[in-house]
Image: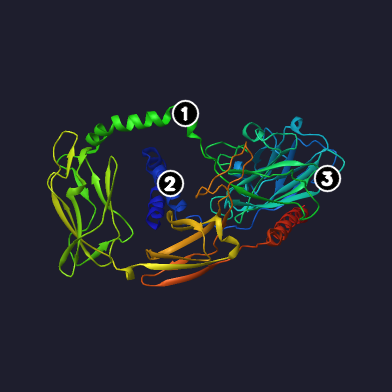
C-alpha cells in the first residue's frame, strides 16, 4: 500500500503527461481498490432472540366478524416457512388461508364466503413465522374470532392406539364429522374438525360447539383429511362424540389397516394355480445362473465339530430346477450315536422350489444327509447328482428359555399369546395354562402381547370400517425381554388396568397451559 502511495505522488507531479498516458488513472484505481480491501467487513453476533409481535389487525378475539384479512406487524423482517404443515384452521375450510410475508408485515387472507354463521374459528401457525436472517421462529401464533355473538367453549379429548400392537399411535389424525354424515363420508368429504395426535397418541379439541359428531381416527398419510382405503389405518367411535366442558368427554381409538378381500376376483385362485404350474419351468430357467447346481443343501459342512445347525428348523434343500420325480427312500438322514450310524425318522415336505426335511433333532449330534443316486429327476428327465453332507446340531445351552406367568384373566382359548423377536413371530398359541414355557429361543431381545381372539381362528383379525367392525383387541406387554444363552428368564404378564382419563390428565393440563401461555404471550407483546 505504501508503494502505491509513493508511485501516485511521483506521477502526480508530472501532471498532464501522466494523465494523458493513462498511468495516473491506473494508479488511482489501484490505490482505491487496495484501500477497499484492507480490512474485510466484520459481522456482529447472531441475533437469536425470537421476533416480537408488535400489533395485530383486526384485534384478536373479535365477535360478530367475518374476518377476511389478518395483518401481523413484527420488529424484524419475516418469512413464512412450511406453512402447509404448520397452518391449522378449526373448523376446516375447503380452501385454506394464505400466509405471505412483506418485510416486517405478515398477511393472512381468508375467503370469508367460506365462513359459517355463529361459528368459532381458531387459526394457528405453529413455527411457520421466522425472521429472515437467523430463521428464529415466532412460535405458536393463535388467532381467535367468531362469526356469532359468543365463543364456543366445549372440549373433546382422547387417545389413539395401534390396533395391531396395542401401543400408542403417534401418526394419526382425529376427524370430526356432522352427526348426519354416514361412515362413507370419510371416504369422500373433508371433515369439519381435524386434530393430530401428539407423540404419546393423545389429542385434544377445544372451542367446540354443543353438537354431536361422528369421530374417526385416520393415519392420513397425505394430509387430505380423508380416509384412503388400502394405504391408511382407520378406526371409528361406536357412539356419537359429545364435547363437554372438562375432561368428561374422552374417546379411545385403535387404528387398523383394512385387509383387501381378494375373493372379489372371480377365479383368481384357479388362475393363480394354473399360472404357477405352467410358469414353473420358465421361472427356473430365468433365475438359474449358468453352471449352477440343480440344488443346494443349506447346511454348514466346513467343520464337523462346529455346532451350526438349529434345533428348531427343518433342513432345507433349495431347488434350482423343477422336479418331475422324487424317491423319498433315497433321501437318507442319519446321526452318529457312539460311533453307530442310526437312521433318523424324517418327513419330507416338497413344493416347487424347496424340499424340507423335518425330524426331531438331537442336540450336539453329528448328522449325515445322503442323497443316493436316482433320488430325484428334473422335468427334462435328468437325474440330480448324488451327494453326502455332514453337519452338527447346536446344544440346548446355546438357546434360552422363556417362562411366562399369565394373569388368570387371560387364561382361556379366547386369548392368544404372541411372542416375537423384531419382526419375526416365534410363538402364537392359545393360552390354556397360567404358566407357559417356550424353550429353544435364540438369545436376543423379545416382546409379547395378548390377542383377544374373538372368532377363535387362532390369529389376529383386522377391522372393517363400513361393516363397523373393530379390529380384535391387542394387549401389549410393557417393556422388552432380554434372553441370554443358557438362561431361563421368568416374566409376569399382568392384566393392564390403565386409567385412560387419569393418564391423560397430565397431558390435558400440559396442553391447556401451552395454549394459555401462547395467547398470554401474544397479548403481552401487543
Give the residue displayed 40% in from the left and 50% down from the top: 8
Figure colour scheme:
rainbow
Report x, y in % for residue 203. Answer: 67, 51
Provide the residue designation for mark 1.
265
Tell me which numbered mark, 2 or 3, is placed earlier along the sequence.
2
Provide the residue designation for mark 2.
28
Question: Spatial distance from mark 2 to mark 3, Cα to Cα?
Answer: 73 Å
Residue 200: image quadrant is bottom right
Tell me which numbered mark, 3 or 1, is placed earlier along the sequence.
3
Furthest toward the top, the residue is: 266
Report x, y in % for residue 277. Answer: 30, 32
Tell me which numbered mark, 2 or 1, is placed earlier along the sequence.
2
Residue 186: image quadrant is top right
Task: State the SS at label 3.
Answer: loop
Furthest toward the right, the residue is: 149
Give the residue displayed 49% in from the left and 64% down from the top: 480
- Nearest-to-viewer mark from 2 and 3: 3
Amino acid at each position: 500500500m505504501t508503494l502505491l502511495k509513493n508511485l501516485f505522488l511521483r506521477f502526480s507531479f508530472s501532471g498532464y503527461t501522466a494523465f494523458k498516458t493513462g498511468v495516473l488513472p491506473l494508479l488511482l484505481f489501484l490505490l482505491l481498490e487496495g484501500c477497499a480491501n484492507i480490512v474485510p467487513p466484520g459481522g456482529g453476533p447472531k441475533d437469536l432472540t425470537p421476533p416480537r409481535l408488535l400489533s395485530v389487525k383486526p384485534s384478536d378475539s373479535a365477535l360478530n366478524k367475518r374476518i377476511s384479512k389478518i395483518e401481523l406487524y413484527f420488529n424484524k423482517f419475516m418469512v413464512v416457512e412450511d406453512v402447509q404443515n404448520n397452518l391449522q384452521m378449526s373448523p376446516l375450510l375447503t380452501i385454506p388461508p394464505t400466509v405471505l410475508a412483506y418485510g416486517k408485515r405478515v398477511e393472512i387472507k381468508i375467503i370469508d364466503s367460506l365462513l359459517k354463521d355463529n361459528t368459532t374459528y381458531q387459526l394457528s401457525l405453529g413455527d411457520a413465522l421466522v425472521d429472515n436472517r437467523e430463521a428464529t421462529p415466532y412460535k405458536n401464533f393463535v388467532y381467535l374470532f367468531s362469526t356469532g355473538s359468543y365463543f364456543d367453549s366445549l372440549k373433546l379429548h382422547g387417545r389413539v392406539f395401534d390396533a395391531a400392537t396395542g401401543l400408542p399411535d403417534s401418526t394419526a389424525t382425529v376427524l370430526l364429522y356432522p352427526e348426519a354424515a354416514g361412515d362413507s363420508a370419510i371416504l369422500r368429504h373433508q371433515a369439519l374438525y381435524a386434530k393430530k395426535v401428539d407423540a404419546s397418541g393423545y389429542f385434544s379439541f377445544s372451542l367446540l360447539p354443543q353438537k354431536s359428531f361422528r369421530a374417526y381416527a385416520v393415519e392420513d398419510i397425505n394430509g387430505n383429511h380423508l380416509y384412503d382405503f388400502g394405504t391408511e389405518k382407520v378406526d371409528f367411535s361406536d357412539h356419537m362424540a359429545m364435547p363437554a366442558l372438562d375432561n368428561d368427554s374422552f374417546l379411545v381409538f385403535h387404528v387398523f389397516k383394512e385387509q383387501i378381500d381378494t375373493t372379489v376376483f372371480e377365479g383368481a385362485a384357479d388362475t393363480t394355480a394354473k399360472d404357477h404350474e405352467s410358469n414353473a419351468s420358465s421361472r427356473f430357467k430365468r433365475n438359474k445362473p449358468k453352471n449352477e447346481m440343480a440344488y443346494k443343501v443349506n447346511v454348514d459342512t466346513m467343520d464337523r465339530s462346529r455346532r451350526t445347525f438349529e434345533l428348531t428348523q427343518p433342513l432345507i434343500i433349495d431347488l434350482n430346477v423343477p422336479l418331475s420325480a422324487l424317491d423319498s427312500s433315497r433321501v437318507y438322514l442319519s446321526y452318529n450315536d457312539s460311533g453307530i450310524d442310526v437312521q433318523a425318522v424324517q418327513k419330507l415336505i416338497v413344493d416347487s422350489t424347496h424340499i424340507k426335511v423335518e425330524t426331531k433333532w438331537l442336540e450336539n449330534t453329528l448328522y449325515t444327509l445322503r442323497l443316493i443316486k436316482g433320488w430325484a429327476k428334473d422335468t427334462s428327465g435328468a437325474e440330480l447328482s448324488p451327494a453326502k453332507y455332514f453337519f452338527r446340531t447346536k446344544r440346548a445351552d446355546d438357546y434360552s428359555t422363556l417362562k411366562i406367568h399369565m394373569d388368570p384373566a387371560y387364561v382361556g382359548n379366547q386369548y392368544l399369546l404372541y411372542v416375537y423377536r423384531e419382526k419375526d413371530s416365534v410363538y402364537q398359541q392359545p393360552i390354556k395354562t397360567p404358566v407357559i414355557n417356550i424353550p429353544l429361543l435364540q438369545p436376543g431381545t423379545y416382546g409379547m402381547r395378548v390377542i383377544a381372539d374373538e372368532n377363535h381362528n387362532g390369529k389376529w383379525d383386522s377391522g372393517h370400517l363400513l361393516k363397523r367392525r373393530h379390529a380384535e383387541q391387542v394387549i401389549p406387554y410393557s417393556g422388552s425381554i432380554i434372553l441370554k444363552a443358557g438362561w431361563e428368564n421368568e416374566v409376569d404378564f399382568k392384566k393392564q388396568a390403565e386409567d385412560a382419563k387419569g393418564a391423560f390428565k397430565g397431558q390435558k393440563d400440559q396442553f391447556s397451559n401451552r395454549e394459555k401461555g401462547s395467547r398470554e404471550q401474544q397479548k403481552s407483546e401487543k
